[in-house]
Image (tube, coloured by chain):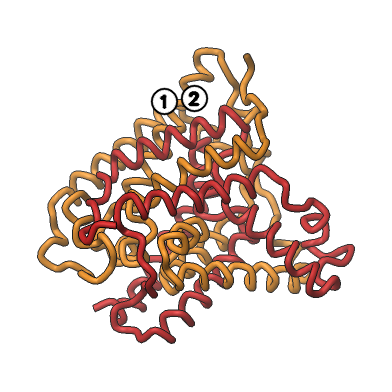
Chain colours: A orange, B red
Amino acid sequence: MSFPLGYTGPVSGVILGLIFGYVLENAGFGSSCKLTAQLRFRDWAVFKVMFTAILVAAGGLYLLQGLGILQVSDMFVPSVMIWGSSLGGVLIGVGMAVGGYCPGTSIVAMFSGKLDGLLFLLGIGLGTLGFNSVFHSIEGWVWAQVGPDGLTLPQLLHLPVWAVWLLLFAVLVIVGYLTRANQSASRKSSPKASGAGLATQNS
Amino acid sequence: MSNTPRPLWNPYVAGVLLGLGLLATFLVTGNGYGVTGATTLATAAVAGKIDPNTVAPHTYLHSLYEAGLDRWIVWEVVGLAIGGLIGSVLAGRFKFQIDGPTQAGRTLRLILAVIGGIAAGFGARFALGCTSGMGLSGSATFAAAGFLFLIGFFIAGAVFGQLMKGLWK
């Protein structure tokens, strides 16, 4: 058996996507209150969920590479586009602060019954059309790549993979420790938002 | 549906499960999770039906229109939607409502959602991925691009989060 398996049909997509949506919903990420509370530093769940997931998946991928079962370079590893990657992150950060969601969480919100999730999704379509209409004036620089294809942090920092993993794990532990207290319980951001009041007990 | 929603999962538990799902996705497909790959294909499909000029040759959307919708990423987003629906219904969190800043009225909430979506949709084409495809999946391969994306995302999110703070009091 060689990885990736190459199952890219509908069944693979629906099952793997279902796990994605189910976990995001139960993490509270269908709530714009919960998501934007991270941006106001009231609730660190977004950071904790994302960082934990990155460490688990990266740990698994590089462990399997170490065991000779797969090569991470056979997976899709995006290259650094100095303007595209950074400004794209900036615009999506602005989008979350203003609109309450990112693309994936807007879909979870919409399927939790939230009309603003649907409108955010329609906005994504409009933004995509906007990009399409200005594409020719920005294509010269927007995806300009720096560094080699699929540049990774271990290559960039000249550190072994395990050192990068431990460094990121240390960041998670430190942030987790500093934000461990139930600091938002006394000043709940919104009792109206679904689950947000309960969420603070867990974060 | 119960009146009191079930508590959310502990964020570390949710993170481990999300990481395992993401790892499985890499092992099965060679890609991680993504969302705007699908929304872009869907936009191309709809726009092409309404106004063929938007997907004419030499436009960005042309090849995406040609690609059609029977793609893994589209099925994955269908799964994402079903997973969100099952999750919210089982937890008693499904509710028709307009979420958003507590100090904003319904119309303003909906306007802000559209504006935020436009910024995200535009930005996702810059980065060729969103918080899922680039921030989460990219970073899970330790790609420098994923971390560059996340740094931009959190800095801009925090700055604009401060600017929006008054609406959330």
Q: Residue at x 35, y 41 (%)?
A: B15
Element assignment for label 2: helix
Q: Quadrant of residue A196?
A: bottom left
Q: Along the horizontal axis of the image, is A33 left or right of A15?
A: left
Q: Residue at x 41, y 80 (%)?
A: B109
Q: Residue at x 57, y 50 (%)?
A: B77
Callout 2 environment at 10 Å: few (<14), some (14 to 19), or many (20+)?
many
Viewer can see residue B153 = yes
Q: Which percent across, then down, holds residue A14?
A: 57, 42
Q: Nearer the viewer, residue B30 or A18?
A: A18
Q: Which kind of residue does numbered mark 2 sit on?
A: Tyr
Q: Which residue is mark 1?
A: A162
Quarter holding the N terminus of chain A? top right
Q: Are marks 1 and 2 in contact (CB under 8 Å)?
A: yes
Q: Which residue is mark 2?
A: A62
Q: Nearer the viewer, residue A7 or A188?
A: A7
Do marks 1 and 2 both belong to one polypeptide chain?
A: yes
Query: Which chain letter matches label 1?
Result: A
Q: Residue furthest right?
A: B57
Q: Along the horizontal axis of the image, is A152 left or right of B88?
A: right
- Label 1 and label 2: CA atoms lie apart by 9 Å
Q: Which percent across, then down, holds residue B122?
A: 62, 67
Q: Which percent across, then down, holds residue B169?
A: 23, 78
Q: Which kind of residue does numbered mark 1 sit on?
A: Trp
Query: Which chain letter matches label 2?
Result: A
